[in-house]
Image (cartoon, grey):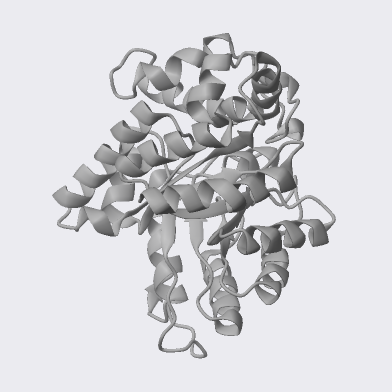
Amino acid sequence: MDFGLVLQTDPPASGVVELMQRAERNGFTHGWTFDSAVLWQEPFVIYSQILSRTERLIIGPMVTNPGTRTWEVTASTFATLNDMFGNRTICGIGRGDSAMRVAGRTPNTLARISEAMKVIRALGSGKEADLGGTVIRFPWIKEDAELPVWMAAYGPKALKMTGEEADGFILQLADLYLTEWMVKAVRDAAEAAGRDPSEVRICVAAPAYVTADDSPGALAHARDQCRWFGGMVGNHVADLVSKYGEHSGAVPEELTDYIKARQGYDYSHHGRSGNPDTAFVPDEIVDRFCLIGTAEAHIEKLNALRELGVDQFALYDMHDAKEAVIDAYGETIIPAVNAAG
């Protein structure tokens, strides 16, 4: 199993770079960041610094979207970084929850994401792409250029499109039942489209907090540090409920039931521990969606995720133990999971 580190690009950028370096030293293969230009610093500028100070780490956004940059600019940025550092970028893409809403826009449609994925992947891989009647190709790109595009999804239509079109699937939660359900939906769609389902890489992304023991106090603190994640996921779940209804059967109730007490969301606290808009998230959801507890508990859940077909676990590191969790994964958890695999 591969391991990724997910960060927000809070200033100073040097701190983000240092954590990514630490992750590479501890056996992580991927480095991801949020991409929301109002809430955090511009990630692609920071990517160049991360790539120049690491040797193997693959870098990309979790996730960008097709609405905040023109598609040829996005593709050119990735292609330039790959030309400089040797095909070490990856494009995670989605509807653009915080990036679009904070700027007063509506998240992108699936149709727009589909068009953007085709253009960005083609241009970033040195091929031609049609920009609505104008066909272009980067004349400076190398022949061995490549740019995988992974799509973030929850709902049935998005999962279907991921299986049909994306190189990878990003699932932002680590619940075992929901992971199995959604991975199956993606792979069924890939097979129905004539693709080899195993070619669609599966990435589960969630907060992880390693405790010294499983005492009630230690677990309570870990849950409070990661509760923000249930609120972030709740934004997407609220969109699904609005679209499909509460009990439509289109989306598992194991995903939708917990947002009934949700009152709203203030993006100024987005992705941060202590977010006051996430008090509605119960402990059960934190335990299901995140990895909480001793190193042994993490190893057990990661092995279960791997058995469900997960190729990468990307660790959201937004809490009060960033360095400690990276080190615990490098010293104990990653070696144990890879040995078992």
Front position in the image: 252 or 180: 180
> Is residue 67 visible to us here?
no
Residue at the outermost right position: 12
Q: Residue at x 46, y 67 (%)?
A: 120
Residue 233 horizontal/vertical position (percent): 54, 30
Q: Residue at x 61, y 75 (%)?
A: 55
Residue 271 horizontal/vertical position (percent): 68, 36
> Is residue 334 visible to us here?
yes
179 relative to 71, above or below: above
Residue 250 horizontal/vertical position (percent): 29, 24
Q: Residue at x 61, y 49 (%)?
A: 6
Q: Residue at x 37, y 48 (%)?
A: 340
Front position in the image: 181 or 210: 210
Residue at the outermost top position: 261
Front position in the image: 74 or 16: 16
Left or right: residue 192 versus residue 281 is left
Left or right: residue 105 versus residue 155 is right
Total number of numbered discs in the rendering: 0
Left or right: residue 273 versus residue 229 is right
33 relative to 289, above or below: below
Front position in the image: 67 or 293: 293
Residue 198 horizontal/vertical position (percent): 25, 55
Determine which quarter of the picture holds residue 211: top right
47 relative to 304, above or below: below
